[in-house]
Structures are given as C-alpha cells and as structure tokens.
Image (cartoon, rainbow, N blue to C red):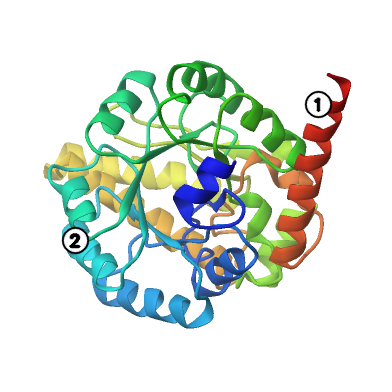
Amino acid sequence: MQRGAEFLGCEHAVLCGAMSWVSERNLVSAISNAGGFGVIACGAMTPELLDTEIAATRALTDRPFGVNLITMHPQLMELIDVCAKHGVTHVVLAGGIPPKGSVEKIKEGGAKVIVFAPTLALAKKLLRSGGDALVIEGMEAGGHIGPVSTSVLAQEFLPALAQDHLVFVAGGIGRGEAIAGYLEMGAVGVQLGTRFACASESIAHPDFKKAFFRANARDAVASVQVDPRLPVIPVRALKNKGTEDFTAKQREVAALVDNEGLEMMEAQLQIEHYWAGALRRAVVDGDVENGSLMAGQSVGMVKAEEPVADIMASLMDQCEAALGQRHAKR
C-alpha cells in the first residue's frame, strides 16, 4: 500500500469511488482529511460547476484529492483545463477509452492519469499510452459495471501488471480483510464507493441512506439491456420502480433511433443524462421509489451512518489485523 499512498500523496491508498451527486465537496474533503483519497464525481457537470466544486473542496481540505471525468463528456477538454487551473494532482478517466489527446492534455497540466480497463489487453494499451495507474473494477460495484467479478479480474490482471504498474482494485469491497487479500496479490490500494455513500459527511438524503441500511447484497441488481444495438453499460442499483423506468427509457431511445435517425453517440448521452437525473432524484430529493439507488453488492455491510474517519479507521484496523495474523502464522 506504500506505493499506492506515495502515488496519491495520502496516508492510506483508499480511493473513494466517484458517485454522482454524492462525491462532492463534503464527502471528498472528509475522505482526504481522514487520510484517504477523495475524488470529485464530475459526471454531467459543466466546466463552470466543476470550477466551483474544486474551489469549494480546496477550501475544506489542504490534502490532495482527484477529479473523475467521463470520457464521453462533450466538454471533456474544457473540464481538463479547469483541473489544470486548480492544480488538481490526479484525474481519473472513466466510462470508455480516453479520446485522442486527452491523456496528453491532462499530463501537460501537471496531473497524473488514472484509467479503468475491462480487459488485460486494453489495460496494457492504456498504461503504454500514458496512464499512470489503473483501477480494475468488478461487477459487484455500484453504478456502471462490467461483466466480470472483482476476484477474477484481480487474478487475471495483478500477476501480469502489479510488478511494473500501479493497480487499484474496486468492486464489492466492504471490509479490511478483503483489502489485505488484494494487497497480498500485488494491488497498491483499493477503491470503495458504497461503503462511504452513507457516511455522516455524505449529503445524500436521509431516505437514500435508510434504503442502504435496509438492503442486503442481493437487492443490488444490474440493469437489463433491452436493445442490443444501444450501447448501454449495465448499472447496479437497488431494485425499485426506477429500475423498471430505465427499461422503458431504453425502449423510448431505441424508437428514436429507428424512427428519427438518432445518432448512437446522442442515444448514449440521452441514457447518461437519464441516469444523472434519476440519481439526483434519489440522492438529493430522497425519491427512493422513482430515483436511482446506485449501490454495490457490499451494501449489505452498510448498517449505520458513521463518520468517514471511523469507516477509514475500521477498514485499516481490519486490514492490519488480517495481514498481521497471516504473517504471524508464517
């Protein structure tokens, strides 16, 4: 974990997953202040909104934090400029292959680039093309997910990459014992989202948090793709009416593709905007029936509202105890 912590410039190599509407100034600064690494979820923000959010986060912490940018954002290059203006140390690129010139532009602004990759071949390509670190995220995670579980990705990627590259593991991590296991396999740190979503410092609506406390692992289900032509990345969330609404939304967008010649890129953006709106309804307005309750399968381990510092301390204690026991036996 020392390698990961040095790369991030923090005490514990624990990244907070970027959760739209949740990973904002309050939670991000609390995670960085607790020794972890907070990451602002830019999501669908405009450059002006991101500018305000970074400045507001900087006012709450003097420790490093990152910004997560979605690769398909129509104003990606302007968002990169905003990060450079504020001296953001790390930019996480999520949601697809980084467009031409984006990685170079981030590095010109002085930041490190963290990338996601669903396959080993793509991971190697992105790391060759300037990615400074990689996050492998299994399908147990909340929000947008790939098709492979964390444990399988870890077994495939870590032996091939961990020697020469910085690899963080994400998806379904809720306790320190799991962190210990991935560190022993060669990871330099981990990323957690669901575990922090209901922290005391999270601005998520009380009803959103209550839905998490009531849920168990099997309630966090992946969305279904209705039309194979639509480039819909599955999303894991707690099952509710909003889950059904998304199926209807896909049918509506597919009809626009058929009848009005809607471009695929535009279709994908419409679906992304749907998620941004549905997530806001749940997180900000507390509409837990119709909004999107994005959650990973580790939601069953989230039982009460706790301060970020307590969550971080218990994760680190569990991790150290697990590693200590294993090494004592040797």
Q: Badge 2 local density, few (<14 within 10 Å), some, or many (20+)? A: some
Which quarter of the rendered picture does the N terminus lie within? top right
Q: Amino acid at mark 1?
A: His
Residue at 19%, 39% in the rendered image:
264
In depth, the one of 87 and 172 nearer the eye is: 87
- Give yes or no for contact between labels 1 and 2 (Cβ–Cβ under 8 Å): no
Q: Amino acid at mark 2?
A: Gln
Residue at 18%, 49% in the rendered image:
102
Q: Quadrant of residue 248?
A: top left
Q: Which residue carries the number 2 mark?
A: 75
Discs 1/2, front: 1
Local secondary structure at mark 1: helix
Q: Which residue carries the number 1 mark?
A: 327
* Residue 322 shows up from this direction: yes
52 lies left or right of 5 = left
264 lies left or right of 305 = left
